[in-house]
Every structure is written in structure tokens, then in C-alpha cells.
Amino acid sequence: MSAPPSCSQSLRMPTIAPSPAPRRQQNEVLTTLTTTFKAFGECQPLAIGIHKAIKERLTGIDPEQLRVALRIHTASTRYLKALSQSKFRFDLDGMPLGEVTEEQRRQAMDLLKERFKKQADRHKAAELAKLQQEKLRLLAEKFNSR
């Protein structure tokens, strides 16, 4: 038998990688925008050219990081839902500034439909694979018991 490890000996614990955070939480610029500006916090449709207003208010913001943050935000399901249901676009303070056109609403709805269809298709494929695995397991049990 081996002696238990002393305090001076280190025990190796398996390292567990942290689960990746959702994309939204990984972008510090987006977190700043969401906590600073009402239109982001309430996920309102943004005014066209909003990036210019952001650059004026948040001087020193990296343009590439801002572009990525805006892309993540405007591609989110929550934003697309808001865009598809709103008649107005909003400035950073949440005040109406422009309209959402019918074509823009339709595009948002089409993207949502496509996204939900892909999700449903993935779910259906996973369920089918699970059923097939169960059938194989039962078949293997049947022949292994002989």
C-alpha cells in the first residue's frame, strides 16, 4: 500500500475546461453598449447609421470591435423579433428616429422563419437518430440473449 500524500505533495486534480459563455457575454463592447444605451438594453430596432452616434459618445472605441458587437446584436433572435414587430427605429436614448420599412420587417421575419426551421430540422434529426439508436440497442439485445 502506498502512503497517503502529505501536505507538501500536490494532488493532481483533473482540469475541467469551463463551458464556453454565450456569444453575447463574450463581447465586452456589446456588454458596454447594452448597459450604457437604452436602445441596446431594451433591444429596440436601431437607427440607420447608429455606429456614428456610438463613436461620438464612446470615443476611443475600436471600430472593428464595434462592428462585431453590432453584428452580434443585430443578428440575434431577440433583435430580429423586435425589428419584425416595430414601426420605428430608435436612437441610443430610445427615442424614435426613422421608420422600419415593410421590406425590412419582411426580411427579419424571413430570417426568423429560416432560423426556426433549421432549429426544428436539427431537433427532428436528433430525435430520429435517438430512435434509430434505440432500435439498434433492442436488436442487439435480442441477438445477444440467444
Image (tube, rainbow, N blue to C red):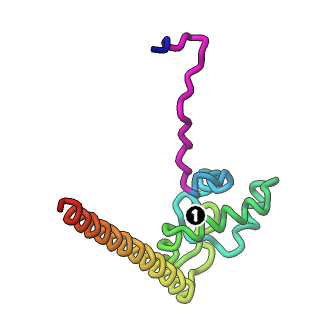
Q: Are there few (<14), some (14-19), or many (20+) residues within 10 Å of tag 1? A: some
Q: Magenta: predominant secondary structure element?
A: loop
What residue is rendered at 31% in x and 71% in y? 132
Classify mark 1: helix, strand or loop: loop
**Residue 112, relative to residue 8: is it above or below?**
below
Quarter of the picture containing the N terminus is top left
Percent coordinates x, y for residue 76 in the rendering: 54, 67
Percent coordinates x, y for residue 130 in the rendering: 32, 67
Number of numbered markers = 1
Membership of 65 in magenta stretch: no
What residue is rendered at 72% in x and 66% in y? 67
What residue is rendered at 56% in x and 50% in y? 20
Question: Is 107 on the left-hand or right-hand side of 61?
Answer: left
Quarter of the picture containing the C terminus is bottom left
Percent coordinates x, y for residue 56 in the rendering: 78, 60
Question: Is 55 on the left-hand or right-hand side of 123?
Answer: right
Q: In this rendered view, identify the residue nearer to me: 45 or 108.
A: 108
Provide the residue span drawn in magenta: 4-22
**Residue 144, relative to residue 17: is it above or below?**
below
| Quadrant in which residue 119 is drawn | bottom left
Q: Looking at numbered disc 1 in the image, what kind of residue is underneath it?
A: Gly
Question: Is 95 on the left-hand or right-hand side of 142?
Answer: right
Residue reaching furthest to the bottom = 103
Q: In this rendered view, identify the residue nearer to me: 41 or 119.
A: 119
The residue identified by callout 1 is 94
Percent coordinates x, y for residue 126 in the rendering: 37, 69
| Quadrant in which residue 10 is drawn | top right
Q: In this rendered view, identify the residue nearer to me: 129 or 145.
A: 145
**Residue 55, relative to residue 31: is it above or below?**
below
